[in-house]
Image (spheres, grey):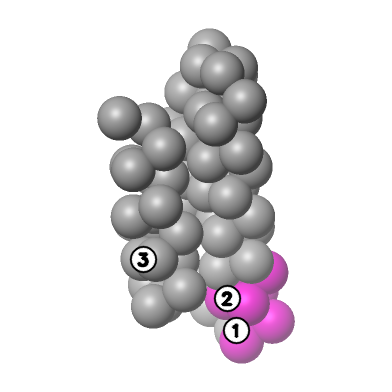
Amino acid sequence: MDSQTSNRARSKAIDTAQLATVLYRQGTREEADHYARTAADLSTVVRSARLNAAMAELRRAQA
């Protein structure tokens, strides 16, 4: 995977996790669950400290 593709995938994963977090906090659980699953799938392909932090925040909002 080239650097540009890797950066795009990382950005998409972080953005998706942040969207799910916002949706959980707004109480839109069904839609948030969809984006949370997508973020979780993307997080298995991409590794980064920012993504780990976004996923941790998502899990806190999910609870």
Q: Residue at x 47, y 73 (%)?
A: 50
Q: Please tell me the numbered disc located at residue 2.
A: 1
Specify the amino acid type for callout 3.
Asn
- The reply to whether the C-beta atoms of the residues labelled 1 and 3 are less than 8 Å apart is no
What segment is highlighted magenta in the picture?
3-8
Asked whether the beta carbons under mark 1 and mark 2 sit within 8 Å of each other, the answer is: yes
What residue lies at 69% left-to-right and 82% top-to-bottom? 4
Label 2: which residue? Answer: 6
Q: Residue at x 58, y 50 (%)?
A: 18
Mark 3: secondary structure: helix
Predominant secondary structure in magenta? helix
Asked if the residues shown at circle 2 and circle 3 are in contact, with their CB atoms under 8 angstroms apart, the answer is: no
Residue 48: image quadrant is bottom left
Residue to which mark 3 is pinned: 52
Q: Is residue 46 above or below residue 40?
A: below
Q: Earlier in the sequence, mark 2 or mark 3?
A: 2
